[in-house]
Image (cartoon, helix red, strand yellow):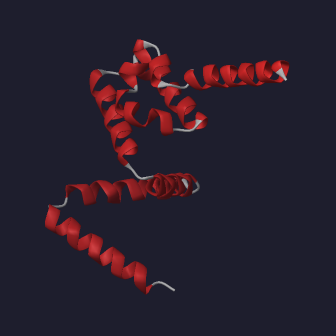
Amino acid sequence: MAAKRLALLSLALVAGVAAAGDEWSSLAPTEKRALAPLSGQWRQLDDGERQKWRGVVDRFDTLTPDEQARVQGRMRNWSNLSPSDRARALEQYRALRTIPPERRESLRDKWQEYQQLPPEDRARARKQAKRNKKDRP
């Protein structure tokens, strides 16, 4: 009985140490600086997501300050998405990766044109896109 308790306690301790390695406090200062926008959600990220974001840290210090700010802005936007919105964003990203490069370039150009529109025109375009989507079979 005592041996069983000791074994269970040992397993719990090992599991606790492994989980603690995934905590924000276990990150190096350079990782914390680069991943700061994700600090509030770090514990909710799965291991794959944490590894992906830690991979960003490897390149972070080679970026210009403007690029670092852009990356952190995207992290902030990502961390503010709901889980369903993240899933939808990943699905859209994967779908875009299957589009031929020349078509992707055309879509990128259209997106830039859209971004240049005044807010009222963008709102009108969004409404029109929703109507078009409803009309599809």
Q: Is residue 128 above or below residue 82?
A: below
Q: Is residue 68 above or below residue 27?
A: below
Residue 82: percent from left, percent from top: 42, 53
Residue at 48% across / 27% down in the picture?
56
Q: Is residue 127 above or below residue 91?
A: below
Relative to residue 86, is residue 13 drawn left or right?
A: right
Relative to residue 33, is residue 28 drawn left or right?
A: right
Residue 18: percent from left, percent from top: 63, 22
Q: How many marks?
A: 0
Residue 18 in view, yes or no = yes
Residue at 38% across / 80% down in the picture?
132
Examine the image and state in which quarter residue 37 appears.
top left
Residue 65: percent from left, percent from top: 28, 22
Q: Hey, which residue is sitting farthest top in the picture? A: 29
Which image quadrant: the N terminus? top right
Examine the image and state in which quarter residue 77 appears.
top left
Q: Is residue 76 above or below residue 134?
A: above
Residue at 34% across / 39% down in the picture?
76
Examine the image and state in which quarter residue 21 appears.
top right
Q: Hey, which residue is sitting farthest front in the picture? A: 1
Residue 99 in view, yes or no = no
The residue closer to the viewer here, 103 or 49, is 49
Relative to residue 4, is residue 124 drawn left or right?
A: left
